[in-house]
Image (cartoon, coloured by chain):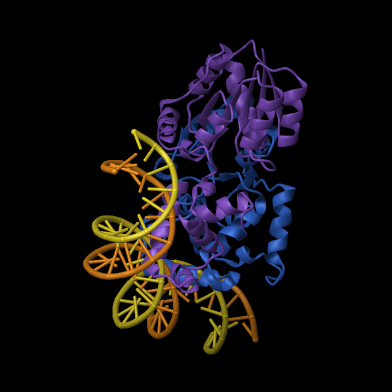
Chain colours: A purple, B blue, C yellow, D orange
DNA sequence: GTTTATTGTAGTGTTTATACTACGCATTTT
DNA sequence: AAAATGCGTAGTATAAACACTACAATAAAC
């Protein structure tokens, strides 16, 4: 039973290893500390399960997950994250993850997840399931910013560049309230809560 | 030998516990998962060492560290962080930490640090030492965010994470205007014009 | 060891943003 | 063809953010 752990923090990697080894004595646990190694090992060797942190330096966890799923589709991948499910769970599951756990989870949950996944099933916590269900309501198959209308996107870019609502109004010769409405719709469509989220999204998706 | 671990992520807490228990068989390891509990236990009971994550929800790690040092000055505190030393090490040491380790550290380093601190000394890695030394030089060549005071930096992080002025005021139990003033000073010191600039800076400098 | 700069804190008055609502015009869906 | 969305646009009322000012407590410098 070969398990591969990927996390850039040694302390966490070793902690996970000990938790797993204690409960799954038959496990042969290997680990990697960055995206490149993860990818290389993930597709170059054969694993019963891969447990990977979702936020590692370099490529985003989701990106690597997709790569792994493309080259080794049969290997189940359990994603671990520091973030609440809203952030990544849906994208992770869509990208083919066999499960999604936050680091708040109890050790026994990790073990349970691994066992369940090893038995060929997925492991979806009720928390994730809820988010997942919500995501099915809308047709959110498009990248968030692609759902924006032209005007909305125009405003989005200006917000991201640091312009205030009223500045944008001036530039576009529109009422402040109009811009506010656009902003609200942008937030709604992109499921974000603050301008900071928008900026982060824009940088990470090279929209700037 | 009583050790107290503080981290909001169960998986990490348990991992640390196992690492410690394995190498320090005489240790009696307890743990807490949030700032409030940490503070209560830290000053209410007697510990040989406290190991605390620096970024927990609620109060910032530095803030709690100061509190602990005020009420239980003799208890050594080893700070753990996800971030590279540049971000927090100097602040932590100044606030009285007995050491600063990142989660990239190897388990043996954690154990070594704990042992050294238990023997009454501080544990400063060469990495941290370097940053520390650098911080003593002229302040002109400091990175923009290093010029911020602790409070300012705290507010900076919250702004960057998308929190509004009033939310921050609530969290820190300060008047909105106070937070506004901090923001103005941050903008001034960092020579930036908008929250978007701050977010960009934070992402580019891995402060998130 | 007194001046000077920095830090933590808030009040006041003004400008901005937000929430909620609405409405006509296109475009889809049924 | 009728009904439901989606989009561009604002008004009003309320909440939040900002600029400016101030002041005491440290901390640093001279």
Q: Residue at x 65, y 14 (%)?
A: A27
**Could you tell me how many numbered marks the image carries?**
0
Q: Residue at x 76, y 20 (%)?
A: A45
Q: Quadrant of the N terminus of chain A?
A: top right
Q: Residue at x 59, y 69 (%)?
A: B190
User: Closer to the camera, A62 or A150?
Assistant: A150
User: Does residue B17 lie above or below A75 as drawn?
Assistant: below
Q: Is residue B89 left or right of residue B187?
A: right
Relative image position of residue B77 (x, y in whole percent): 55, 45
Q: Is residue C22 left or right of residue A140?
A: left
Relative image position of residue B95 (x, y in whole percent): 55, 56
Q: Quadrant of the C terminus of chain A?
A: bottom right
Relative image position of residue A144 (x, y in whole percent): 52, 45
Q: Residue at x 59, y 20 (%)?
A: A20
Q: Is residue A206 left or right of residue B185?
A: right
User: Does residue C12 lie above or below A101 as drawn?
Assistant: below
- Image quadrant where residue B90 sits: bottom right
- Image quadrant where residue B147 sits: bottom right
Asked whether residue B2 appears in the rendered view, the answer is no
Asked whether residue A50 appears in the rendered view, the answer is yes
User: Closer to the camera, A101 or B137?
Assistant: A101
User: Does residue A168 lie above or below A36 as drawn?
Assistant: below
């Amino acid at each position: 039973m070969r398990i591969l752990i990927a996390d850039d923090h040694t302390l966490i990697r070793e902690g996970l290893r000990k938790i797993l080894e204690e409960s799954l004595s038959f496990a042969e646990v290997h680990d990697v500390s960055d995206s490149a190694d993860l990818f290389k090992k993930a597709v170059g060797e054969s694993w019963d399960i891969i447990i990977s942190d979702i936020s590692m330096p370099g490529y985003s966890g989701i990106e690597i997950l997709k790569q792994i799923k493309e080259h080794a589709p049969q290997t189940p991948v359990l994603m671990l994250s520091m973030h609440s499910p809203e952030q990544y769970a849906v994208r992770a599951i869509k990208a083919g993850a066999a499960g999604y756990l936050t680091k708040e989870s109890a050790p026994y949950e990790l073990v349970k997840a691994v066992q369940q996944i090893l038995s060929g099933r997925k492991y979806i916590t009720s928390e994730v399931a809820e988010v997942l269900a919500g995501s099915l309501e809308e047709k959110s198959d498009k990248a968030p910013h692609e759902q924006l209308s032209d005007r909305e996107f125009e405003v989005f870019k200006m917000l991201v560049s640091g312009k205030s609502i009223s500045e944008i109004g001036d530039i576009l010769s529109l009422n402040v309230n109009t811009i506010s409405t656009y902003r609200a719709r942008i937030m709604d469509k992109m499921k974000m809560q603050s301008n900071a989220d928008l900026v982060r999204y824009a940088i990470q998706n090279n929209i700037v």
